[in-house]
Image (tube, helix red, strand yellow):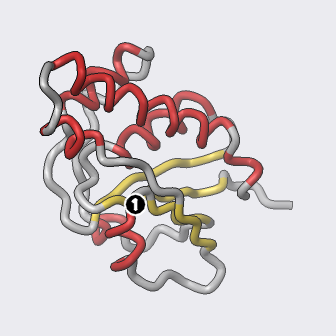
Amino acid sequence: MKNQKTRILFLCTHNSCRSQMAEGWMRRLKTDFIEPYSAGIKPSSVDPLAVRVMEEAGVDISSYRSKHLDELRGIDFDYVITVCDHARQVCPVFPARTNSIHHRFDDPSELARKAGTEQEALAHYRRVRDKIRALVENLYKFL
């Protein structure tokens, strides 16, 4: 019988928004049997609007930081979930026992740049936040 938690890596390009939200939801909802991580191919910084909309939902990711995938070398992941197309395309090869899942989410920061108002911008972040929560809540269907 397996004694350790299932290790899941959420991978995105910048580890600034979608993968951070996914890690935050997983830590909030599923930490009894899952050990979540997030990283990026080209990390930048955590998006303040992502922090804001997650806080609205009761999840604090304000202490999170954007990490490069290399920082997590040595961790054996059971699953790698790419949450953007670019990360999927350039995703490095993981050991054969690591399962890969791709679940694309819109990039709220890109959509927000085209928004006319702050409320329109936040609406994109909230929509993506809620879709990511739904994925986390139903992840057992994929695992």
- What's the residue type where badge 1 is placed? Leu
Q: Quadrant of the image for the C terminus?
A: bottom right
Foreground residue among 102 and 6: 102
Report crowding for label 1: few under 14, some 14 to 19, many 20 or more residues within 10 A (C-alpha): many
Foreground residue among 109 and 58: 109
Q: Quadrant of the image for the N terminus?
A: bottom right
11 up-or-down from 122: above or below = below
Q: Is residue 131 left or right of residue 140?
A: left
80 up-or-down from 83: above or below = below
Q: Residue furthest right?
A: 1
Give percent across and percent down for residue 20.
35, 43
Give residue 83's quadrant in the image: bottom left
34 up-or-down from 55: above or below = below
Q: How many marks?
A: 1
- Residue sitting at x 66%, y 51%: 5
Q: Is residue 47 left or right of residue 80?
A: left
Q: Which residue is mark 1?
A: 11
Give percent across and percent down for residue 13.
27, 62
The secondary element bearing badge 1 is classed as: strand
Give percent across and percent down for residue 128.
41, 36
Give residue 120's quadrant in the image: top left
- Residue sitting at x 37%, y 72%: 73
Q: Is residue 100 left or right of residue 127?
A: right
- Residue sitting at x 34%, y 79%: 90
Give percent across and percent down for residue 57.
44, 16
